[in-house]
Image (cartoon, helix red, strand yellow):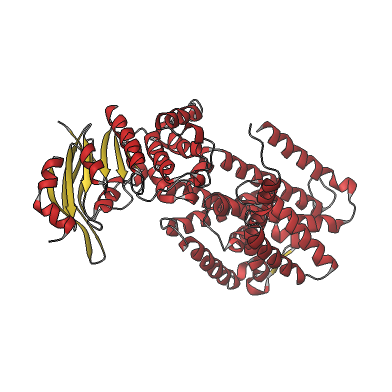
Amino acid sequence: MTALLQVREVSKSFGGFTALDRVSIEIAKGERFGLIGPNGSGKTTLINCISGVLANDGGGIVFNGEEISRLPAYQRTRRGIARSFQIPRPFSSMSVLENLVVPLEYVAHRDSLLKADMQGEAMELLRGIGLADKADTPSNRLSQVELRKMELARAMAARPQLLISDEAMAGLSSNEVSEVLEILFKLNATGITIIMIEHIMQAVMKFSQRVICLDAGHIICEGTPQVIVANPDVQRAYLGA
Amino acid sequence: MKRFSIGALAVLALAASMPLIFHNEYFFFAAYVVLQFVVLATAWNILGGYAGYVNFGSGAFFAVGAYTAVALYKAFALPLGLQILAGAAASGLLGFGVGMLTLRLRGIFFSIATIAVAIILETVVVNWSYVGGAKGLPIMRPTETPFFANHTVWLFFVMTLIAVVAVGAARFVETSWIGRGLRAIRDNEVAAECSGVPTLKLKLAAATLSGALMGAAGAPYAQYLSFVEPTSTFSLNYAINALAMPIIGGMGHWIGPLIGALLLGSVQQIVTVTISSEINVLVVGVMLVVFVVAAPEGILGLFRKFFPRRKS
């Protein structure tokens, strides 16, 4: 098992508030990794540090053997880290198809802009995720589940090795949750490593091979889903002492 | 692309043949101002419309172009073409500099900085006696006018050329991958960055190009008036018009600022002549309010609403 991503003692504070306190994680190539924790435990801060939206204060992040923690986010995307957002962030003035063309232009085909058939490729991705009929729809007219799917498709358009799904299932019905889950399983089967952040326990537990639980910026438990569920610290963090 | 080039050439040919149609010099004097606004509005829109970063200091970029030209003309008697290039370079550099200092941050910081820059630079020029300081400097027009019989007509043609270049540049930016990147920035900067868009680089490029075009618009200003002084060169009118025209015309498409500038610019000229030069400022304000309230997508938005594009 070779590590694709190594988070080494990463810390991040906002003023006097410590959101992450020397957090270390290793994620293997092809792994399905779950990240859980109560609200405010630092999950999103951690993946913001990994994806480059925030700069970590201390520690290091190594991706594919390269230290990336001082690179701007777009450079990390080009190296193979793509993500979706907890609150969807569509390019709302663009159609669904165009949303996908942005990463195709700026990541996948940035050296061959003239030759590539980006519309066709974007269409292919939309077909794969079940949004082909919405290709020309303005992205601000999508439903919640469609937005989530579009964000995943847009992340996929950057041809990532690591996909970070930040609560892609929040606010979805149980049918929709299994739909998105199926998509993520399918992507993982093609060799993409996936970090899933989720509050819907059934989904994380079903999906992940390994789970880490964060609480107040610390890792309180790490292991298989069964180990996590049985852990008293996790139960305390979620249910209160 | 081909159609646009033909259109551009047609506009230039039309401008060149104008002296055969209009014999009143005032027509060219007024048309020059309208074209100047076409450049300013188009330039403003590259950063403000496409990327969503509002420049409140267009007057400063315009004035830097004008005063660069004046200083070089006085020092080396540089020909107009080089004055324009130098003015564009100076204002482009200013755009890059202000961008470098503020565009790392998202949001309103750039806008605030542009206001500050306008005030600082005006103070500098007021105290710079070489270019006339506060009392201004008369500029002798060159005695020889190339190609045209009359210097005003020549400047009108030059400004048409700058306008064509500006609109062409804006159109190129808009239809290329750069334009899509800028729109992604405007829609959601974090998502743009995470989709691989180098947001800072693109914003800096847009600020530089936008500044350079404004500087080019300002460079012939002193020759046009045969005089230059800071109050009118740094006038808030430029800043307001550069922003109002794209808003009224429509910001998403290169033709929006063009329509806005032609419409608003012409109305202002007509009002100035027929009613009063004070009312023309009122016209901008009233139209801006009306459009922001009733048609936030501008004239283009209204057009699209009533003539929805057929699906191809």
Looking at the rendered image, the quarter that the C terminus of chain B falls into is top right
Residue at 9% across, 52% down: A232
Vertical placement of residue A132 versus B55, above or below: above
In this picture, residue A138 sits left or right of residue A80: right
Can residue A52 be seen by looking at this rendering? yes
Q: How many marks?
A: 0
Could you say where residue B216 lies in the image, as x and y percent from the top left? 64, 52
Q: Nearer the viewer, residue B200 or A216?
A: A216
Vertical placement of residue B174 versus A133, above or below: below
Q: Nearer the viewer, residue A172 or A44?
A: A172
Residue at 17% across, 46% down: A212
Could you say where residue B275 lies in the image, as x and y percent from the top left? 83, 69
Residue at 50% across, 36% down: A134
Q: Nearer the viewer, residue A127 or A120?
A: A127
Could you say where residue B127 lies in the image, as x and y percent from the top left? 58, 73
In this picture, residue B141 sits left or right of residue A96: right
Could you say where residue A132 lies in the image, as x and y percent from the top left? 48, 31
Looking at the rendered image, the quarter that the N terminus of chain B falls into is top right
Image quadrant of residue B221? bottom right
